Image (spheres, grey):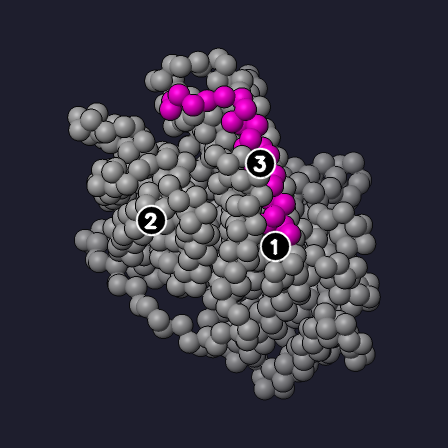
Amino acid sequence: MRTRPSLLRRAVRSLAAEDPGQVRLTSAATTTLTLVLALAVLILLTRTLGQPITVALLGTVVAMFSAVAVQDRTHRARVVSTALTPLPAIASAGLAAVLHPYGVVADLGFVAVLFTATWVRRYGPRGNALGQVAFTAYFFVLFLRASTSQLPALAASVLVGVAVALVVRVVLLPERPRTELRRLTRALRAVCASAVGVAVAGSRSASAAGTVLDDAPLRRQLTRLGDTALMIEDWLDRHDAARHLSVDGRELSLRVLDGQLATEQLVATLAALPPGTTWPPELDTVLAALDTVLRDEPGEEQLRGLLVTVGAAAHDVDVTTPTGRAVFTAARAVRAHASIHRVSEQVVAAAEREDPAPVEGTDTVDAPPGLHPATRAAVQVAVATALATGLGELISPNRWYWAVLAAFVVFNGTTSRGQILSRASQRVLGTLGGVVAGVLLAAVVGRNAPLQLGLIVVCVFAAFYLVRVSSALMVFFITVLLAMLYGLLGTFSVQVLELRIYETAAGAAVGIAAAFLVLPTGTRSTVDGKLRACLDSLDDLVRDSVAAVGSGGGEVDLVTASRDLDDTLVALDLAAEPLAHGVLQRVRTSTRLWLRVVRAADGYARSLARAGHAAAAVPAPTVEVAEALAAAATRVHEHVGALRARLDSDHPAPVHPAEPALVAVLELDGRGVHDPEVRPLRAAVYALARIDRALLDLLEVAEEPVGAARLTG
């Protein structure tokens, strides 16, 4: 008898599902281990040399942030950036120690450091990392009230801390690309198995009850699937696949895209089965084979047997029927995931080669007119932190830097006023919760130094494990950490944490005001820009895919084009979050409508891209058919142009459905539905029809641009 899993086990499964490939777990573990080792080594050294604990804490914090902030694209670049972090850290710490006794001059120095730390983001990941470390060092020297007499010890502490960070990154917890990829591909198979399982169970239940399937659980599963696939793309950005696998990055990306798309199509096909449908035995056979591929670890011989079974089951199905289409799409999913499984389990045994050195200064994209975004943000940060300094000192002359920190952090990684408002509110909420928890924990822990250190380590792990889930949770654990740190330094009091609330609120308010008044970038204009980028990527992918189908494949990299569309959609989701969850219902409704349709078009466009890939394996259609398909695609391009005009608040020219032109393509082609050589063309026609319908619906319903209330935010 199967027992119900315990609450702890369910929690662990839930966390694992939210962290495909244990990427967040590995990152948080690396950061925590760096903190623990740096703190242990530096406390031992400072006690031996008779230095205060504040010296050890600075090196520990710099080591921790060097592990977090360094995000270069290759392993070699990450090691180099980590090795460079002592330079800005020592310079910034020295400046803070020298200026600290001079009051206003120290304040101006802090503003200058914050401006520079923001401005250097223009130089990419390395500039961002070095700027973050410089800001962190200046802040903690002020926080620890270090003196100029401690500068040699502080510099030595930073060097030792960064050396520990390098040891952790290179020796103790080195990057293991193959292991990480295996975890990610297993996570991909697991979420695919879960999505198919939900679709099968829901479809059977709905069919038996004669009702319509609730698609909300399926949407959640497919969202997880898309997130996992993008994490594999992130792995490909950070590693050279050819060094670790039997295929290159483009081939792996194509196989992952095939598996993702085949699973999405299978789920959609199962969900669309009419109520009361009787499932043929062939469908059960193919779904059982898919379950084996996704949930087990089949060897090569077993994979061959499964593929033979699937091929026999799907050989004579009628794809014009709903169940026939389900068998066909399930068989394709089996083949796609078998292909991924073979790649991920058969890594290259040859010795590793060195990562190629990163190429600097090869970006030839023209910069947009006006101020560089990093310069704009730096000016905003300088104004906000200068104002926060004055307001913070009115609240507390000794704790004013909390207000400055809040004003700076609300700008970090944001691109619009709406995002800044969201970040500020999360920071205040996280601080409030952290203060309450910190006071309660301080009362329980007392002056127990080992327990305080243990809680600091736990808070660091939790903060960096949850940072991608919620910034409010990260701030919560950082605030609890500070309560423990104050207790360790012997300066804890409830009044100090109360001041943190006031200072944080003041800094957040100043940051919001600066975002709205100083070189503002409106949320709506940002969302419009991201939406235009999505439409451009959609237009490009439709054009290239149709050209590939019409010519029997081609040289265009449709995998890259598909992922470009996915990336622009992720950026759009992030930028539109303040509007999609805003106060005004009209704005929420308009924004969510656009997002829903663009997401749907993204899925259909990837189906079209897959048809373009499949076209390389069959003879090209006739010239007349290819021209008819291109003419039908022109209608879709017109719809995209009309949506661009709608974003510009213009009245677009009348558009006409592409459906008649697409029907003409199939009539002109004339081949039977069972002819395997016609499948790419038919898949392209069906995908274009879905894109056409989605865009037409949006043009009919969305009478105004996204966020049409024209808020200033």
Which residue was labeled with disc 3?
395
Q: Quadrant of the N terminus?
A: top right
- Say which residue appears at 28% left-offset and 34% top-offset: 55
> Observer-nearest residue: 630 or 86?
86
- Say which residue appears at 66% left-offset and 69% top-offset: 688
Query: Is tag 1's residue or tag 2's residue first in the polypeptide sequence?
Result: 2
Residue 617: image tag: none
Kind of residue at badge 1: Ala
Q: Quadrant of the C terminus?
A: bottom right
Crowding at dot 1, Cα within 10 Å, few <14 / some 14-19 / many 20+, comes out as many
User: Which numbered mark, 3 or 1, is in the foreground of this view?
Assistant: 3
In the rendered image, the vertical position of residue 674 relative to residue 399, given as above or below: below
- In magenta segment, residue 499: yes
Query: Is tag 3's residue or tag 2's residue first in the polypeptide sequence?
Result: 2
Measured as percent of width and height from the top left, residue 291 is found at 51, 41
Which residue was labeled with disc 2?
95
Spatial CA distance of label 1 from label 2 is 26 Å
Measured as percent of width and height from the top left, residue 236 is found at 39, 57
User: Which numbered mark, 1 or 2, is in the foreground of this view?
Assistant: 2
Q: Secondary structure at mark 1?
A: helix
Kind of residue at badge 2: Leu
Measured as percent of width and height from the top left, residue 70 is found at 36, 50
Measured as percent of width and height from the top left, residue 252 is found at 40, 58
Crowding at dot 3, Cα within 10 Å, few <14 / some 14-19 / many 20+, comes out as some
Which residue was labeled with disc 1?
514
